[in-house]
Image (tube, grey):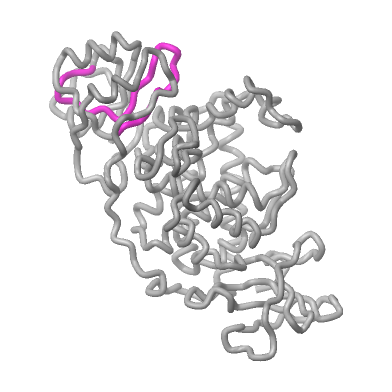
């Protein structure tokens, strides 16, 4: 677990995970940096830092410290890792809220499974009704959380954790059911829907990679709360229809740090989840924000959530942007994989989502309109399709499921804009 303490309470032998400066902003997050002596504490004070987030495993014998609990250990961490503080201080001028950590986060060691070895517990039709209820409840929970934060209230643990746990359970039962619902968008409640979708998509990719349930939970918590800092930004700026000026853009970019800082101040958020909130806008080539981290310096979970965040944002109608079709979004992300996201993770995300993602519409060579029901992960161009409109574009009395891997007469010829036809997974009875 991590705790927030006054800089005056920092002692040699403690391991710090983050710092705050005089302005109250979180400066940066590192991982278990060892404080070796009083001189290093004095250096931090001189730099203008007023508080530190520490790994309390290193201070169990120091009960006199004034502490404010704030989270948990990073996923995959096997204990404190020593980092030279001098290297970090060279990169951290006094009161610089955007200072970069000189060292990468600890190497995340996950035993990733072959996605083809991952089996669903139940079928799509059996899970879809349950998944709808979970998604609706998740959106209600996020709406409540966000409104509470804007009103200055603290984060409620039980409902949020239950929501994320339900999403994890649904994805284990059937990874395609609740994932298909992430393609359903609400223009009037974008921020809340977006947070739920990013959590669903992040957990789905995490499961595709074979992460453990406890790691998926931490990933999901960070993802569902990744934009909570936006509630600390003036609402008029958040909903501004036009382009931001330089000052406004700079303020908007603070939301990642505000999210990480807010979660770090809670009593139950794992450090891995805090990394997701603070680093989901970092980019593989170092061009992201707020710290300009690059490559493996970006927490593995934050890289997963960053991919989910971009995908959902691009496929959603926004005040200033029309939604891009899922297939075109994946094509764009693939072209930027080496620059923004890291090539391997983007390729895994496409394998997880499918070239034609679940819930998207396609036109078949027969003229029928089909809705993608599931992905054939060993043959991405031949998914399971539910024919919902006949070749005359009239609704079918009962959707016809077709496995294109075994179908010889029909094939996909193109993706179809869902706004043309009022058909979604939600409109089809299980």
Q: Position of residue 185 (x, y in %)?
A: 69, 52
* Residue 55 left/right relative to 27: left
Quick check: 281 above or below 327?
A: above
Q: Which residues are magenta?
A: 10-30
Identified at 44% across, 16% down, the residue is: 24
* Residue 318 left/right relative to 196: right
Write down the quadrant of residue 112 in the picture: bottom left
Write down the quadrant of residue 89 in the picture: top left
* Residue 344 left/right relative to 181: left
Nearer to us in this view, 116 or 131: 116
Task: Report if residue 116 lies within the magenta region.
Answer: no
Q: Quadrant of the N terminus?
A: top left
Nearer to us in this view, 108 or 328: 328
Quick check: 327 above or below 137?
A: below
Identified at 65% across, 59% down, the residue is: 328
Task: Report if residue 21 lies within the magenta region.
Answer: yes
Q: Quadrant of the C terminus?
A: bottom right
Identified at 40% across, 40% down, the residue is: 294
Q: Position of residue 385 (x, y in %)?
A: 65, 77
């Amino acid at each position: 677990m991590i705790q927030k303490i006054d800089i005056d309470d920092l002692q040699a032998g403690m391991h710090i995970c983050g710092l705050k400066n005089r302005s109250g902003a979180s400066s940066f997050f590192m991982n278990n940096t060892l404080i070796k002596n009083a001189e290093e504490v004095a250096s931090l004070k001189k730099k203008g830092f007023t508080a530190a987030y520490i790994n309390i495993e290193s201070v169990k014998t120091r009960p006199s410290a004034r502490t404010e609990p704030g989270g948990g250990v990073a996923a995959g961490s096997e204990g404190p890792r020593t980092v030279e503080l001098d290297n970090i201080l060279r990169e951290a001028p006094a009161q610089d809220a955007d200072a970069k950590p000189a060292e990468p986060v600890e190497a995340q060691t996950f035993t990733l499974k072959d996605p083809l070895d991952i089996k669903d517990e139940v079928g799509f039709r059996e899970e879809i009704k349950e998944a709808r209820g979970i998604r609706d409840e998740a959106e209600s929970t996020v709406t409540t959380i966000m409104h509470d934060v804007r009103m200055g209230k603290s984060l409620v643990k039980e409902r949020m954790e239950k929501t994320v746990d339900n999403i994890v359970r649904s994805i284990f039962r059937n990874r395609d059911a609740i994932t298909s619902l992430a393609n359903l968008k609400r223009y009037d409640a974008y921020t809340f829907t977006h947070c739920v979708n990013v959590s669903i998509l992040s957990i789905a990719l995490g499961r595709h990679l074979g992460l453990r349930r406890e790691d998926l939970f931490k990933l999901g918590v960070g993802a569902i709360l990744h934009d909570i800092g936006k509630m600390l930004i003036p609402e008029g700026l958040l909903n501004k229809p036009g382009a931001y000026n330089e000052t406004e853009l700079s303020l908007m970019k603070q939301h990642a740090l505000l999210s990480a800082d807010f979660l770090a101040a809670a009593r139950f958020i794992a450090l891995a989840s805090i990394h997701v909130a603070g680093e989901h806008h970092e980019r593989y080539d170092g061009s992201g924000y707020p710290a300009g981290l690059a490559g493996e310096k970006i927490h593995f979970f934050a890289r997963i959530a960053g991919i989910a965040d971009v995908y959902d944002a691009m496929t959603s109608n926004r005040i200033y942007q029309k939604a891009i079709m899922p297939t075109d979004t994946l094509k764009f992300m693939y072209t930027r994989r080496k620059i923004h996201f890291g090539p391997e993770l983007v390729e895994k995300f496409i394998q997880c989502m499918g070239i034609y993602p679940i819930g998207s519409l396609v036109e078949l060579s027969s003229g029928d309109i089909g809705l993608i029901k599931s992905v054939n992960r060993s043959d991405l161009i031949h998914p399971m399709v539910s024919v919902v409109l006949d070749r005359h574009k009239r609704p079918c009395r009962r959707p016809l499921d077709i496995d294109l891997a075994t179908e010889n007469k029909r094939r996909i010829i193109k993706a179809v804009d869902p706004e043309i036809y009022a058909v979604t997974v939600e409109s089809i009875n299980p």
